[in-house]
Image (tube, helix red, strand yellow):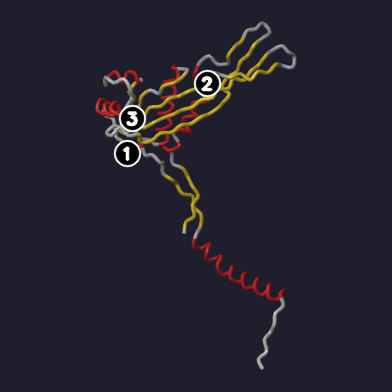
Amino acid sequence: MTKYKILNCNQFRKSNWTSVAAILLICLPILFACSHTEKVLVPPRIDLKTYKAIGVIDFSSTPRDDLREYVTQNYIQTVQSAQPGVRFLELGSKKQVLTRISRKELDLDAIKSIGGAYNVDALIFGHFTATDPKPNVRLSSTWQSLQAGAVVEASLITKIWETDSGVILWTNSSTRKKKVASLRADTDGNIKFGASDPEEAYGHLVPELVYANTADFRSCYEYRKVK
């Protein structure tokens, strides 16, 4: 008569764990040998160097129209830093461009006309918006002076059109909130804004907005599993 060895529960569990451990010891080296993580350079989502020339209309700006050139130049510099060799042609203000092509709005026909009039393959235009400084008032402990941090909220919306078809190739928007200057009032009631020059007031805010807005034009590194 054949005898069978009967294992109790503890012996059965121990036997199973031993088998699992043996399998893992065999499989883990194989798995690690088959795949590993590498730092990979990912190209930009939008490659602007494929265009022979890109027209840039001065960005509009509200409520400070005197920021148009500052925002536009910052944008051009940031893009060319991300993609050296991109060829930009500055076209002037929106009003100047529309007057030259005898159009009233920047619509489909206007985009195509700009391509022919200025010999550009693509067109960039954007709009910068900033709120008036909102003070956060603080009174000194000696009650001799009043100090307020001036905070503004700003946004930047940009678009790129292909001038042969008039279609929108790309669009993006970015928003930021930042302390840009200060307000001060003395005991005589005189109130002063910490920055009279708009570039000084919004100088730190604009580059941050532009950098965030142009993320699709920059290469970046990612960690990926490679087999």
Sequence-earlier tag: 2 or 1: 1
Identify the residue under disc 3. Answer: 123
Q: Earlier in the sequence, mark 1 or mark 3?
A: 1
Name which quarter of the figure residue 171 lies in: top left
Under circle 1, the secondary element is helix
In which image quadrant can residue 71 be found? top left
Instruction: Return the residue at label 2.
Output: 131
Depth-wise, is mark 1 or mark 3 nearer the camera? 3
Q: Please, which residue is most extreme toward the left here? A: 116
199 left or right of 20? left
Look at mark 1 in the image and give the residue it sits on: 50
Q: Whole-Å distance between the Cαs marked 3 and 2? A: 27 Å
Which amino acid type corresponds to the residue marked 1 in the rendered image?
Answer: Thr
- Dot 1 surroundings within 10 Å: few (below 14), some, or many (20 or more)? few
N-terminal of the pair, mark 3 or mark 2, is 3
Give the residue displayed 44% in from the left and 29% down from the top: 157
Q: Amino acid at mark 3?
A: Leu
Can you tell which quarter of the image residue 102 is in? top left
